[in-house]
Amino acid sequence: MRKKIIAGNWKMHKTVREAEELVGSILKGLPETHYEVVVCPPFTALYRISQLLEGSRLKLGAQNMHYEIQGAFTGEISAPMLKELGVEYIILGHSERRHIFGESDEMISKKLRRAVETGLKPVLCVGEKLEERERGLTEKVIERQLVSALEGLSREDLDDLVVAYEPVWAIGTGKNATPEQAQEVHAFIRSKLSELLGEEFADSRTILYGGSVKPHNIYELTKEEDVDGALVGGASLSAESFLGIIEKAHK
């Protein structure tokens, strides 16, 4: 049975004190659920949030990392640094990293390899821009992103791999893919994983949807066969909305 995950990507939001307050509220209201729940604060809050999560059901994730272990990379954070803080999940290839900060498929592949070597669980983000969807290039773009990222890695290497489909046109826009659109792309991702690494591997992969996920649309999305949860952006910044998403998904 595939693991179900709801993950909150806080992006560049929340001071340490604000992060403490948000996590405190989430922990207080967290319902019993078959979903694994992950929070991904900014780097500055990871140490404190790691302390608060000890012994809880909440898992800790980070939003990015460098592909080198150490070195002269001013402003960067390495996988071992995150691992030491108790980080379990790492978001890689988020559309904002690709399209705002210019991260290439090659760079994301290096990051994925380092995450695997370090024992972090990668959440690999893939997705198309609006003009790519309108030109019928969705599958071509996602295939390129997957093939490049996974090149040279085995099924054993990728045992903890999670994939997140993020239609770039739906991130922070208030628009979201319909459940049918999400299912279509999730099914394509699973079929491509089957081609690359085998049917058994593909069937066991958790594939999340990310793109303007809210309490009012999560249930319809997660009812789809190949949608195993969500990577939540703005709605994860409020305990009320994030808990609402968890509750609705669980039902």
Image (cartoon, helix red, strand yellow):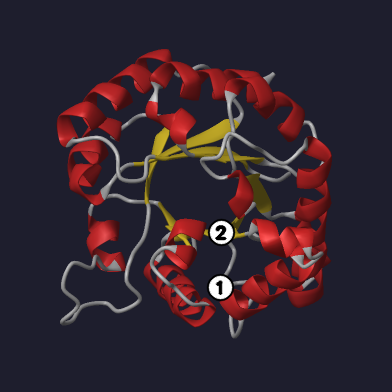
Q: Residue 31: horizontal and vertical position, in percent?
A: 51, 16
Which label sits on residue 235? none
Which residue type does callout 1 highlight? Asp
Quadrant location of the N terminus in the rendered image: top right
Rate crowding at label 1 as few (under 14), some (14 to 19) or many (20 or more) other CA atoms within 10 Å: some
Q: Is disc 1 placed on a helix, strand or loop?
A: loop
Q: Mark 2 Cα within 10 Å, few/some/many (few <14, many 20+)?
A: many
- Outermost residue toward the bottom? 152
> For residue 49, what is the image quadrant?
top left
**Picture quadrant where residue 60 is located:** top left
Rendered location of residue 238, percent (x, y): 39, 23
Visible residue check, residue 222: yes
Q: Residue beneath label 2, please?
A: 125
The residue at 78%/37% (across/down) is 179
Q: Which mark is residue 157?
A: 1
> Is residue 160 visible in the rendered structure shown here?
no
